Amino acid sequence: MTKRKTVAVIGGGVSGLAAAKAFDERGHRVLGIERSHDFGGVWEPSRSYPDVQTQSPKDLYRFTDLAMPEDYPEWPKGPQVHSYLHAYAKKHNLARLYRLNTNVVSMNRRADGQPGWSLTLEAAGRTWVEDVDFVAICTGQFSEKNIISHPGQEEFVAAGGQVMHSSEYTDPSLAQGKHVVVLGGSKSATDLVVNAARNGAKSVTMVYREPVWRVPYFVGGINFKRLLYMRAQEQQFNGWGGSALGKAVHTAFKPLIWANFRGLETLLKLQLKLKKWDMVPDVPIEKDASCSLPIVTPGLFEGFESGKIKPVRGTFKAYEPGHVVLSTGERIPCDLAALAVGWKLGIPYLAQEYRDKLIEADGQYRVYRLTVNPDLPDMGFVGFNSSFCTVLSAEMIANWLVRYADGQLANQPSAAQMRKNIEDMLRWRRQERPAAKVYGGLCSAPFHFRHFDELLADMGATKRKRANPLAEQFSYPNADAYGSFLQSTPQYAAG
């Protein structure tokens, strides 16, 4: 019989809820730890900027056993996602497992010599230590703000200017009557400039370093989920490993693959008028597609056309009272600088000696199946397998991780097998697909189907594909179908 464990689940966002449910339903004692006052992670309202909405359609951004409400729009807004996550937590009674307003200060191997970890926790001015058998780290990609500064910032602020991380822009009235400058070209950056332009900003400027491929919700009138989320499309990218036959087939079809992506680029250039705005990327879209591929914020290019939003290529060099100076030498009026410069990827509470085993010198993570490291036993990550269907990805890896922790995978890997796979994947990212190095190499996109295939095979699923081969090949991942695939895995309970 599988031994019942005490499992710490760090984080109460999408990934944390998926992990808490997976370990709890197998009979483990779950200690959920969330540093804020509420579930939701990046979707918790105090951490969300106005008008934030999903990049993925609602039928892709969901758990297998709970669809989003029918009256939700196809791309739900932040408060709707937050409400959905609460509905999931309520359905599985997950609140009973969590301690809110609790922070992890440090994480070390247990002092008593037993397997597992000692967590130093802090809440309400009190600090204590909890010993656990296993730790699921579920803080994901967006936990610690990336804070940057530039010369002259103190004087700029003293003169009445404001500088903030994009996640701190939580009130649309912040922009009213002000010269707003947003640094960055990501989805959060474009969301902010559109929101500022719609909420009475005197001027809005978007400063970005390099043009990137952006995909609108509808490409040529077709929902992008029907173009980019297919197994057939995924097979056109240069994936890892592969047989000699598979590589030969890919080579034979290379001219058609090339034509397919050039056609997509041409469509995007025409639809978004990228040449007019000097925003045509230098990198082919098939080499650039990853988790960093942003969706076009509705109203962005319309804002360019109307003159309400000015795109400027460059970066910040310094601040002056009432202005920001760019690397190009241009001085732009600025009362509010919003820095959409992303998040720090890391585990600051994990002792340095263990971080050194996990993270390579170039920032790449040493993880098998994007979740475990053989040199860091009794721990794993949920939500590090970032993707275009984040909720499903988290649920799939959470179900894999609990079986790994219990030794219940049908294909339980040895330490040697994991180390070899990790080295192979590092080599693939560095030499064959540099786009896969984003987020420390912790991105399964655009290879969702292949990632899920591996997880299901490891779990011993007897069903891994839909019965309709056309739907399986030419449609996007179906959450209900993956629910049935998970049910086809061997079931067990700890006790």
Image: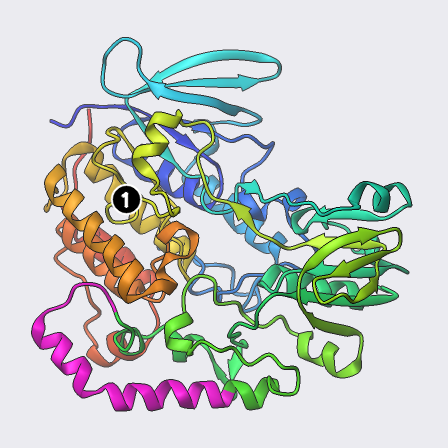
Quadrant for the N terminus, please: top left
Range of magenta residues: 239-267
Mark yes or no: residue 257 visible.
yes
Q: Which SS class for mark 1?
A: loop
Which class describes the residues within 10 Å of circle 1: few (<14), some (14-19), or many (20+)? many
The foreground one among 416 and 114 is 416
Residue 274 horizontal/vertical position (percent): 60, 84
Q: Residue at x 55, y 81 (%)?
A: 280
Quarter location, residue 379:
top left
Residue 30, placed above or below residue 160: above
Task: State whether the magenta stretch is mostly helix, strand or loop.
Answer: helix
Colouring scheme applied when the structure was drawn:
rainbow
Residue position for label 1: 367
Residue 309, placed above or below residue 354: below
Left-right relation of 254 to 346? left
The question of residue 256 being in magenta is answered with yes
Query: Which amino acid, mark 1?
Result: Val
Which residue extends farthest front?
Answer: 329
Quarter location, residue 71:
bottom right
